Structures are given as C-alpha cells and as structure tokens.
Image: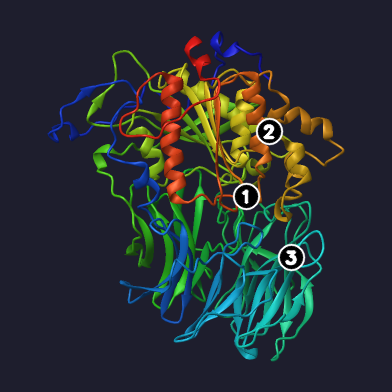
Amino acid sequence: MELRGYFLHALPMVLLLIGGCMPAQTDDSFSHGNEVQVAPYGSWQSPLSATDVFEQVDEIDDLQSIGNAIYFSEVSGSAQGKVGIKRLIERNIVTQVVSPEFNVKSRVHEYGGAAFLGLGKSLFVTKKQDQLFYRIAPNQEPFPLTPNGTRHADCVPFSRGSRIICVREDHRVGAEPKASLVALNLNYAGEGETLVSGHDFISTPVISPDNAQLAWVTWEHPYMPWDNSVLWLGDLDRKGQLSNIRRINTPKDSSVTQPLFSPDGKLYVISDLNNWWNIYRVSAKGQLQRVLTKNADFAAPDWRLGNHNYAFEDANTVIASYIQGSQAALVRVRLDTGITESLAVDFAEIYQVVKGGDGVYFIGAKSTPEKGIYRVVGRGTELVYAPALVKLDPNYISRSRSIAFATGKNEQAYGYYYEPHNPNYVPLHDTRPPLIVMIHGGPTARASRAYRSEVQYWTTRGFAVLDLNFRGSSGFGRAYRQSLYGKWGESDVEDAVNAAKYLVTKGWVDANKLAIRGVSAAGLTVMSSLAFYDVFHAGVSYEGISDFEQLAKGTHKFESGYLEQLVGPYPENKARYRQLSPLNHLDGLNEPLLIFQSLRNSIVPAAQSQLIYEALKEKGVPTAYITYGDENNGGRTPTQKALGLETELVFYGKIFKFTPAGELPKLTLDNEPVLGSK
C-alpha cells in the first residue's frame, strides 16, 4: 500500500496514451438564446433531473423469438421498476401481453434472467413475488405449475412430450438450494421429472431441431461459470427420457457458455480456450473446433441466465456480437468459407441476439441516446422498437473519451472519461472540475460507452466522470478478467487511485475534489480507496461490502465460492480477509462517506453498511446512513434511485463547497461540523 500523503508530493509516472491538454467540446449551443453564465463547477443548472434519469426510462431485457413475433421483457420506470412482457410483430406493432404489475422476474442464482418462455399462444413466466412458474393462456387466469420453494428459469420447449425443460433451483431442503434440469407438464401443476442433477449449478439447456439431443452447461463450487464450466450432451427419446449423457472434451481452465444448435443440427458453443470468448463447433468426436479466431469477447460473464450473443441467420451463416476494447459490433460469419462481414459498427452495446421469423434481431445501445430492438438488414440495421427514454438535447451531451493508464507492475487499466459539459455555463477562471470515479459491480462486469443518463446528470452539472474498467473487468479477455483473482480489494483499488492521479496529471480535474462511488462489490472499492490511500476526498457506497469475513460467512449460493477466487480460501486465509477489509482499517478512513443500504438485501446484508457507519460516526468522520426496504440487490425502485442521486449531489456540494442548483433533499451528516475545519 502507498504511503499516505505521497500523492500530494510525488505523482508517479503514468503512461500517457492520449495526448494533449484537457479535451474540449465545441458546438453552436451558445446561440440557443440562453445567456452564458459564469458559475462554479457542480453548481450548474441541468436540463436533466434525477426523475428523468430513472423514472422516465424503460429498459429492455430478455428477447425471444416465438412464431412470427418477438417477445421481450421490459423494466418499466413509471411502474417503479416492475417488469412486464411485450410482443413485437410486423416490425413496428407492439402490444403489452403481460402487465408490469405481474412483475416477471426469476431469482435463480439470485440475479435471475430468462424468466419467460413462449409456446404457441401461451406464455410461461416466473412471478417475482412468489417465484412460482405460471402458465398464462388467452382468456384464462394465470395458473401456477410449480411447487412453493422452487425457482425456475432458462426454459426450452420439448414438443414431442408436450413439456418444458427448465433450470430449477430448489430451496425447500438443505442448507443450500439444489440445482437440476426438470421437465414440467404444460397443463398440470407438479414436481415435474428430474432429467439432470448432481451438479452445484446447471444452466442453458438447448434442444436440437429434431428434438433428439439436449445440451447444457454445469459448473461446481468454488468456481463461477466464467472460470471453469462444462458442456454436456445427451440423447432424448420420444417421451423425453434422457440417455447417453457425455461430457464434451474441454480443458479444466476454461469456460463454456451459450450452447446452440444450428438449423442442420450441429452443436456450437462459446469458449475462452484461447483467452478470448470465441465461437466453436463441437465435432462428431466431441472436440471443440474454432469457427472464428478474433481477439474479442463474443460473450459476457453469466451473472444472469439467458445471454445470447449469436444466432444462425441460416444453416451456413452466423451473426454474432462481440466486444473488443471499447468497440461493440456485429459480424456475419460464413461457416463454409470463414469469410466475415462487419455489421453494426456504431454501437456501444449489443446483446440478446436472436433469430426471428424475418431475420436476426438484437438489443443495441449507442453512445448517443438511441437504443432499442434492431433488425439486421443486409449489411445494416434498422431500429424496430425504442423504449421510453428521456431525450437530452445533443448540445448538452458529454461524449466519452477512451483512456488507458499505467497501473500495477507494468500493467494497464482502462476507462471512459466524460468532461463537464453544459453550453449555458463556463467555469470560474483557472479552476478544474470535481471528478467522480464510477466503479462497476461484479466485480467481473465492465464499464461501457453506451449512453447513460446517470453520467450526463453529473456532467451537465459541472462534474467530470470516469467510468473505470479496472483489472478484472470483462471484455478484455480471460487473462485480464482473472488478473483480479487473489487481488480483489488491492488491484481494483490501485486502479481507481491511479486513474484519478492520471486525470490530475493531465490537468483535467481538481486534485482536491476527487470522489468515488460504487454499488455492491464496487462499494468495497470505494471504502478501501478511502481507507488505504489518501487520494479521494469523498466516497459514496450503495449496498457496499466493508468486511470480507462477514461476506465469506454469509452470502448466497451462487457467489459462495467466489471469494475463494478473488481473495483465497477461507478460513485458511483469515488473516488476509481481515487485512483487506476496510472495516478493520478505520485508522486510515478519514474522508466523508455517504452510505445507502437496503435493509432486506439478500446478497450484501445490511450489517456490512451498518457496522462501518457506526464505527465512522463514533470516530468523528462526516457520514450518513440512508436505508430503504427493497428485498434484494439492485432492487431499489426508480424513485429511490432518483432520491439517492439527488442526495449524492447535496453530499458533494457539502464536501466540495459549492451550492447545487434546484430543489434538493436535505442531508445532515453526522459530524458535519468537521467539514468546516478542512
């Protein structure tokens, strides 16, 4: 760890991969009729409210092709984050088929995904409130098919047996829920028939076009699906009985994901055998044969079920999405010749690639506010559905700038930098903006170039923002993703600190106004950055982890072995767990910390926040602890998220000595008088 105060005296040499002085955005927006005002950074009046950011926005989730229609789940901002299902036909006709009030969401692996299946005129969906799996048929009341205490998702139809094959997580017996693949009757409630069991985790069942084969993926503790996972194949008879189960030959130190049969019955899968998640064909002898070699990731970590990054346009053509650094794109691959064709190169995010009745569809987002469901048309794409999104005048939008900087031992980390931008204001002379370093969750997730109103909320008010891809982030290959293993709470923290230093060295931000924020796993990075370094001047933690030991003793099944990868086996490494926990290093945690916490969070218990809050309050550090009552991680309603954003703004105003614009909630910090002495 770095000597405290060192930052103020000797900034380390950093790799300057983007040159020049502070980037400038120029436009004609000063002629909009508004008088340009001189005002401190952070105090600018923004056209984007916190309500705009969360309550006026819908998010598209799972995408599925059913007959001649595309069905998709949609998170409704106006319905406080509840999830309904819509149907898209003829490329532009959209109808609501399941109301958001039903609230479709599975909690398999806690994070859910793939919570519905369409079959004929019926839908089969998991209801969030009770986790029962319902049949919703025309002119009938929703009918539950599954027992209490079970969760179902990632289902596929088996037409020969008039059944559905689903991933089941059974919470009725034992200390840990049991995973299985089960076949459910379409018409009757019951236990169903167990097809596969005996594994810690099971996902992604897919059935061949002739209904003769079933493929699926498994993994075991302590690994995550993106560490070491296994592809299986079995034969199905007419009654749906499974036999001749065999394991596809893959090395232990690799992952497989998204098995998919081609229209002519060949099995494909995505694997990171060569460091990158590339597409492979499974040979008749069970060997993986690479279809396309590209230093890019054609998949994302399976935090949730139902990811789809490729689809068959026809038996000889695959359309696949990938991430390569900051670039998201589609590629068309001719399987017989290996010839590739680039498609949709102007996107920042592409996911849920599925084959529809009239082409391949996907969900896409750009660095501008445009996002929605798209269809591939020749070498281009067309937008066929756009969810609700508050449109910000382009003149107010801060565009991201990719950065790379030196960190660790001759290593690099990456991020997207957004400068403050509001055509109605200029800052005070010879000042630099405050910086907010945003840390993504996971920690095996990633920052993205996709337009986010949450970022623009800050930049239009006069903040600079850095969205950080620290070591361990996905989208840069397996080696980068696993470079955090054994070093969580160290490498990510070091990268956050070095990112802030890099921007200070460039002259883009104020060295005395550096803040860091994050949710869940990212909350650990926030608190550790404050505890172990003397660089950031404020932190904001949502559902943050403060104590590794508590987490090791009491987290949910899906992540119960994750700490063994990220930190080391427990209790053998008890001393290291304590060494890395910010709760045990309050001597170094002296900067103001704002804490938000759900009291019913099943992933990061409230005690993680409560303990560090009480300790900081007792120590005399300016702090506040704000709670709400939703039941799980990420479960804050849009209203609660908007209130949190406004409260953050008030918090930064107190710390960085500016008066935010607009009507904002009151915030009283414990030990607030200390701020006057700084």
- Report the mark closest to the observer, 3 or 2: 2
How far separated are the C-alphas under marks 1 and 2?
16 Å
Q: Amino acid at mark 1?
A: Arg
- Front-most of residues 262 and 415: 415
The image shows residue 292, relative to residue 246, as above or below, that is above
N-terminal-most mark, 3 or 2? 3
Q: Are marks 3 and 2 in contact (CB under 8 Å)?
A: no
- Please name the residue that numbered disc 2 is placed on: 611
- Report the mark closest to the observer, 1 or 3: 1
Q: Residue at x 54, y 75 (%)?
A: 117
Q: Position of residue 528 (x, y in %)?
A: 64, 28
Q: Amino acid at mark 2?
A: Leu
Specify whether 83 is left or right of 39.
Answer: right
User: Which of the 4 image quadrants contains residue 424?
Assistant: top left
The image shows residue 353, relative to residue 407, as above or below, that is below
- Please name the residue that numbered disc 1 is placed on: 600
Q: Secondary structure at mark 2?
A: helix
The image shows residue 12, relative to residue 111, as above or below, that is above
Q: Is residue 483 visible?
A: no
Dot 1: within a 10 Å radius of its alpha carbon, few (fewer than 14), some, or many (20 or more) residues?
some
Specify whether 425 is left or right of 481.
Answer: left
- Please name the residue that numbered disc 3 is placed on: 171
Q: Amino acid at mark 3?
A: His
- Front-most of residues 79 and 73: 79
User: Which of the 4 image quadrants contains residue 169?
Assistant: bottom right
How far separated are the C-alphas under marks 1 and 3?
18 Å
